[in-house]
Amino acid sequence: MAAMPYLLELLKIVSGALNADRPKVVSYVEQLAGRLEEAGDPVSARRLRRTLAEGKAKLMEMGPASVGTRLPVDSESRLDLADEERPTVDAVDLVLDSEHLEVLREFVGYVGAADRLLAEGVGISPSLLVFGPPGCGKTQLARFTAAQLGLPLLTARTDSLISSFLGSTAKNVRRLFEHAMSRPCVLFLDELDAIAKLRDDQHEMGELKRVVISLLQNIDALDQSTVLIGATNHEHLLDPAIWRRFAYHLKIGLPKEGGRRQLFQLFLSRHATQDVVILAASVAEGLTGSDIRQVSEDSIRAAIVHGNETIDECDVLRRILRLRLPEWGARGENMPELVRRVREMNPDVFTYRRLAALFGVSLGHVSKLIHQRERGDGKGH
Ligand SMILES: Nc1ncnc2c1ncn2[C@@H]1O[C@H](COP(=O)(O)OP(=O)(O)O)[C@@H](O)[C@H]1O
Ligand SMILES: [Mg+2]
């Protein structure tokens, strides 16, 4: 087979992109467009040049500092202090209750109107603190927001910023913020709880003070083109002075039934019927978005292994019950009690037929177990 044409250009572009070497990408895309034109394909050449022009316009918006900017590293360990990504709108799905979505929309609208507000002399503080239990979408929300704003997301995991570099934290925090300020971006301080954990350790009290002070100073020094998002699982442990630095506060709790439906729909997509999605959502109370993703992915894997197109209703219900009921793992020993508990969770969903299938016993057996209990209750024990 003949070698692929333009392989050289392609390889240079790929390597330039992987090394974040924008000038290299630009010059080889130009060269490729020229060669396509010579070869009699002006349409493709034009498309390439248009893409390039759009990309260049973005670069101009981002300012010259973005070209070739390296991520900040800890001076001793050389480890990155942050990750950078450019989330896109179609690649980040976020499920939020409508009231929370409202707050987020307001925030995004406010940041988008920054120029107009500033022109009117209205100061802005584009900062948002997200809090709530783990696995409910805080990190996802930061990615979603960056995508909505069309800005790069610079994520600093606070624990790695502090714990590995005790002593040089203040310097690291300053470096991180300087990097963030070198062009418009969303600076995301994830897992802010890490700061509070220092409080548990007597030896770290001094370090805790230094970290909090340096964070406060750096937050205060941010200009309005840096959007700041913070996330924590334990808002009550957060230093009140840090809490006050954020203009918007958003609590993301466990998903409600509507949210769970959207999440199952998102993660099961074509692998489940609508009925199964509704059923799963109705019994998955107490599960986080992250749990729902896990349950969905495990069910899909099981279906594929068994050669099925769609997931099995009982399989997904069992996985949900395993997360909701700690005693599920030992169901062999205590089946009667467990059958009754599951039945009580939701008698409409857990019909005798479903219980029989879930526990792998006969309908008659299920009926006997449940009636035993009802007779027991009737005697007033
Ligand atoms: N509300 C949600 N919307 C969409 N996906 C979610 C949501 N909550 C959790 N997830 C899924 O679970 C994973 C973990 O969520 P994450 O945002 O890291 O939670 P947190 O930061 O609150 O601990 C995400 O990658 C996403 O796939
Ligand atoms: Mg997170």
Image (cartoon, rainbow, N blue to C red):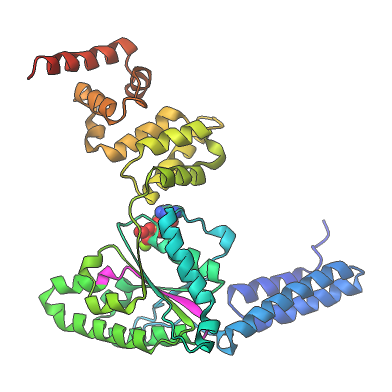
Marks counted in the figure total 0
Q: Nearer the viewer, residue 218 or 380?
A: 380
Assign ligand 2 to one image quadrant.
bottom left
Q: Please tell me whether residue 192 belongs to the stretch shown in magenta.
A: yes
**Residue 257 image-quadrant placement:** top left
Would residue 160 be found to the left or right of residue 183 on screen?
left
Question: Which residue occupies 81% across, 74% down?
Answer: 33
Can residue 165 be spotted in the picture? yes
The C terminus appears in which quarter of the rendering? top left
Could you say which is closer to the camera, residue 150 or residue 301? 150
Q: Is residue 214 rendered magenta in the image?
A: no
Q: Is residue 272 above or below residue 16?
A: above
Work out which quarter of the rendered image holds the N terminus and state it: bottom right
Q: Would you identify the image quadrant in which residue 359 lies?
A: top left
Q: Position of residue 345 (x, y in %)?
A: 28, 31
Residue at the location (54% across, 67% down)? 148
Residue 113 locus on image (x, y percent): 53, 77
Horizontal relation, residue 147 to residue 165: left or right:
right
In the image shown, does 106 or 241 lie closer to the viewer? Answer: 106
Magenta residues (range)? 183-194
Report x, y in % for residue 136. 37, 55
Which of the 4 image quadrants contains residue 39? bottom right
Q: Is residue 302 visible?
A: no
Q: Residue at x 34, y 76 (%)?
A: 246
